[in-house]
Image (cartoon, rainbow, N blue to C red):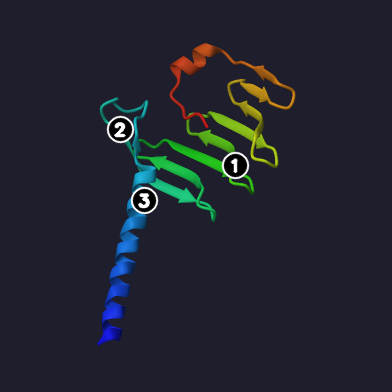
Amino acid sequence: MDDKLIFINGIFLGILLSTVIISAIYIKCGTRKSAKESPKKPAIIQKCEYDEKGNEIYREYSDGTWEKRKYDANSNNTYYENSNSYWVKSEYDSNGNLIHLKDSKGLKVDKQEQTQTKPDPDYYEQQEFKRI
């Protein structure tokens, strides 16, 4: 009888754990407002993909937009791209500190040389994108 109780408890815990994992994925993915849809109607995430370390590498929304990410061995986000043709490339030192950053609109940051090139500021006021 104790074996049956342990078995039933094991099944219950397995179901509970599955529910928690699915809930965590939904919470992590969530929703966002889309430039293509009304501000009152957020785009719903329809697809999320993760690498073997649990880093989100792809996200697709109900309005057809998407985001891609790449990571280095230390899980630092080294590349971001979205369906609006916006991208960011980043490089980190061995301690995880950002040392280089470059985006598709001309922003360049070099922490080693302490330089920064700024793009047209009007672009950032007109666009909706996610900063990394």
Mark 2 lies on residue = 42
Name, please, the residue furthest toward the right. 113
Q: Is mark 2 on a helix, strand or loop?
A: loop
Horizontal and vertical percent position of residue 85: 52, 29
Q: Position of residue 82 (x, y in %)?
A: 49, 34
Q: Which amino acid does label 3 sit on?
A: Ala
Distance of label 2 from label 1 (alpha carbons)? 28 Å
Query: In the orientation shown, which residue stands out farthest toward the bottom?
Result: 1
The mark found on residue 131 in the picture is none
- Which quadrant of the figure has residue 93? top right
Name the foreground residue: 21 vs 85.
21
Tag 1 or tag 3, which sits nearer the N-term?
3
- Kind of residue indicated by mark 2: Pro
**SS at mark 1 in the image:** loop
The percent coordinates of residue 132 (x first, y second) are 52, 32
Packing grade of label 1 (10 A; few <14, some 14-19, many >=20) is some
Residue ID at (64%, 40%)? 96
Q: Nearer the viewer, mark 2 or mark 1?
A: 1
Camera-side residue of 38 and 17 = 17
* Residue 76: numbered disc: 1
Q: Which numbered marker is on residue 24?
A: 3
The correct choice, above or below, for 51 with respect to 30 in the image is: below
* Label 2 to label 3: alpha-carbon separation: 20 Å
Q: Is residue 56 above or below residue 11?
A: above
Question: Nearest the camera: 3 or 113?
Answer: 3
